[in-house]
């Protein structure tokens, strides 16, 4: 039997969760035994928005959200034993892969892989690598070790943001791995079906915690003030909680705000109801695939890259300063000037799950054959943080 252990998020409706659901389905249909270890409590009462992931809630381990070098060694060893018990019996010689996605699970994944003799693949799912709470710089040599072994699933230029200030890679050094989320389907949704047409329907698809969201809201407000004769509907796909105060601060009588909440899958009909989409990463790519005019976001400048497929090919970072613009300017270009109509559309459709897994197979085939692991003493070297330990314990107790 082949075993695949994903240390990923299962709650919420972001790109990671959609990717996990699609990957689990593919792996199981191809004979893999799959276990997903998330950072929720194994007794969590929260249902997953993606119902197919609910069965993995009992496998949750809250400590995977804490970097192991910030925990007492005895806690780390105990949690690793729990994970091994969750995975179950593995016969000698069976193929085993552990896949992780952020700075804490990457470290846990390396420790776990060493104990079960698995290949550990780290997927660069984060968009920012120097933000609070991340520990990439502290263990940068660990990631260099994984890169040298060919055990990082990534794409160009994302890999250079991980190693920014330390190492630099050329495009030829990377075999681009794009996630497949399958988020858009032909399903009926009453709230989408009843959407009416305004002069301009502007749709943001994504989580409200993204750091560029305040600039999107401000950009729409400024754009609306410049076009007071137009009725604008600002349609939001995703929950609004952390940006509620900012959203309520929009005082433009010509702007109507419609919150659709989390939608999975995304109804294909949505794209017939909107004039422009603002999104980043997978949401942006899949929207372009559907034929939408998409204003791409930049997680570094927190502004826009321009119109995806026309001004830029990047849905995460600007390709050059000439593409950087405010969301107000991007909306002006997309809806008023419509400059994209006179530009060439250049776009490579997002790979399907079969394509993504074929790329992963190539990456694994070219990785260092012998299974070896980063020095555990170096990985666990750090200062114990009691607050982090207590947060994990409390999260476990309240079954979050």
Image (cartoon, rainbow, N blue to C red):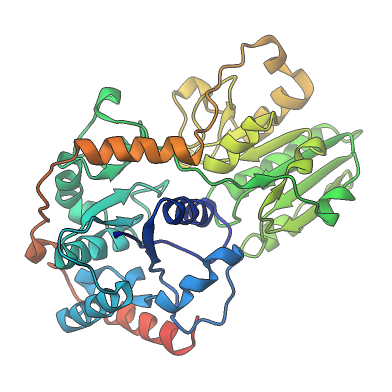
- Residue at x 25%, y 74% (from the top left corner): 84
Q: Is residue 289 left or right of residue 128?
A: right
Q: Residue furthest bottom?
A: 397
Q: Nearer the viewer, residue 334 or 272?
A: 272
> Residue shown at 20%/35% (left/top)?
366
Exactly how many numbered labels are in the figure? Answer: 0
Question: Camera-side residue: 125 or 360?
Answer: 360
Q: Determine whether 117 is above or below 268 in the image.
A: below
- Please report the residue visible at 88 percent of the width from the left and 43 percent of the height from the top: 254
| Residue 86 x/y as whole percent | 32, 76
On the rendered structure, is 292 left or right of 180?
A: right
Depth check: give the residue in front, 5 or 145: 5
**Residue 207 in sight:** yes
Whether 228 is drawn above or below 239: the answer is: above
- Is 392 rendered above or below residue 291? below
* Residue 389, x across and y down, in percent: 30, 81
Identify the image quadrant of residue 101: bottom left
Residue 38, horizontal then vertical, whole percent: 41, 68
Q: Is residue 52 left or right of residue 156?
A: right
Q: Is residue 164 visible?
A: no
Q: Where is residue 340 in the image (x, y as percent from the top left)?
A: 68, 17
Q: In this view, does 311 lie above or below 167?
A: above
Quadrant location of the N terminus? bottom left
Q: In this view, does 89 lie to the left or right of 299?
A: left
Based on the displayed image, in which of its 4 quarters is residue 191 positioned? bottom right
Q: Residue at the location (60% across, 49% down)? A: 213
């Amino acid at each position: 039997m082949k075993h695949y252990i994903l240390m990923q998020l299962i709650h919420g409706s972001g790109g990671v969760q959609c990717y996990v659901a699609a990957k689990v389905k593919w792996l199981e249909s191809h004979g893999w035994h799959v276990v997903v270890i998330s950072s929720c409590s194994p007794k969590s009462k929260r249902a997953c928005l993606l119902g197919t992931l609910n069965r993995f809630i009992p496998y949750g381990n809250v400590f995977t959200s804490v970097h192991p070098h910030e925990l007492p060694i005895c806690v780390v060893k105990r949690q690793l034993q729990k994970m091994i018990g969750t995975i179950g019996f593995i016969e000698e010689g069976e193929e085993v892969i552990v896949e992780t996605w952020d700075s804490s699970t990457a470290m846990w994944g390396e420790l776990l892989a060493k104990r079960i003799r698995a290949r550990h693949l780290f997927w660069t799912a984060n968009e920012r690598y120097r933000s609070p709470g991340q520990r990439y710089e502290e263990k940068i040599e660990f990631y260099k070790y994984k890169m040298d072994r060919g055990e990082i699933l990534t794409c160009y230029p994302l890999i250079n943001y991980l190693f920014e200030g330390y190492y630099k890679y050329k495009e030829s050094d990377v075999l681009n791995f794009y996630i497949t989320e399958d988020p858009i389907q032909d399903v009926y949704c009453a709230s989408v079906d009843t959407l009416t047409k305004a002069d301009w329907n502007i749709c943001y698809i994504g989580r409200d915690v993204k750091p560029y969201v305040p600039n999107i809201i401000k950009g729409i407000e400024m754009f609306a003030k410049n076009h007071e004769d137009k009725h604008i509907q600002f349609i939001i796909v995703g929950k609004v909680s952390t940006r509620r105060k900012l959203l309520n601060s929009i005082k433009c009588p010509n702007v109507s705000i419609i919150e659709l909440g989390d939608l999975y899958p995304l109804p294909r009909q949505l794209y017939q109801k909107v004039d422009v989409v603002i999104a980043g990463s997978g949401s942006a790519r899949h929207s372009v695939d559907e034929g939408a005019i998409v204003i791409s976001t930049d997680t570094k400048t927190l502004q826009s890259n321009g119109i995806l497929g026309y001004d830029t090919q990047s849905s995460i970072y600007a390709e050059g300063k000439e593409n950087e613009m405010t969301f107000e300017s991007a909306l002006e270009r997309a809806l008023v000037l419509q400059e994209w109509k006179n530009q060439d559309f250049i776009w490579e459709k997002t790979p399907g799950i079969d394509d993504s897994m074929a790329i992963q197979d190539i990456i694994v085939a070219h990785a260092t054959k012998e299974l070896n692991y980063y020095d555990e003493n170096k990985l666990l070297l750090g200062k114990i943080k009691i607050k982090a330990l207590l947060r994990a314990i409390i999260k476990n107790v309240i079954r979050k």
